[in-house]
Amino acid sequence: MYFQSLNELLHMDGHGAFVWTAYIITIAVIAVILVAPLRRQRGFLRQLAGELRRQQGDASSPGDN
């Protein structure tokens, strides 16, 4: 193993802060890339369902009079 202890792994000869920050930023960006389309799709489906309910409500209104 390259690192003799967990402490050495975290510090990486003084470069650990940069390396771990890069990993964290990368993971955060990937998470946003994966989650954003799912949230957008859920919002679109909610909007579409609302529009369909409104259209069905408008279609039944003239027959009720």
Image: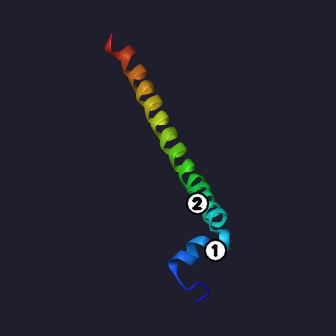
Quick check: 39 left or right of 2? left
Q: Which mark is residue 12?
A: 1
Residue 46 sits in which quadrant? top left
Q: Residues within 10 Å of mark 2 (few under 14, many from 20)?
A: few
Q: In percent of the image, x 57 and y 52: which residue is there?
A: 32
Q: Which residue is mark 2?
A: 24
| Quadrant position of the C terminus in the picture | top left
User: Residue 54's mark?
Assistant: none
x and y, in percent, of residue 56 in the image? 41, 27
Judged from the image, the secondary structure of the residue bearing numbered disc 1 is helix
What is the three-letter code of the residue carrying label 2?
A: Ile
Q: Residue at x 59, y 84 (%)?
A: 3
How far across and how far down the image is residue 45, in percent?
48, 41
First in sequence, mark 1 or 2: give its number: 1
| Image position of 62 (left or right of 48) | left
In the image, 23 versus 65, the foreground residue is 23
Instruction: Give the residue at x 62% y 87%.
Output: 2
In the rendered structure, the answer to whether residue 53 lies left or right of residue 31 reads left
Q: Secondary structure at mark 2?
A: helix
Q: Please tell me in which quadrant of the rendered image residue 53 appears.
A: top left
Question: Callout 1, which amino acid?
Answer: Met
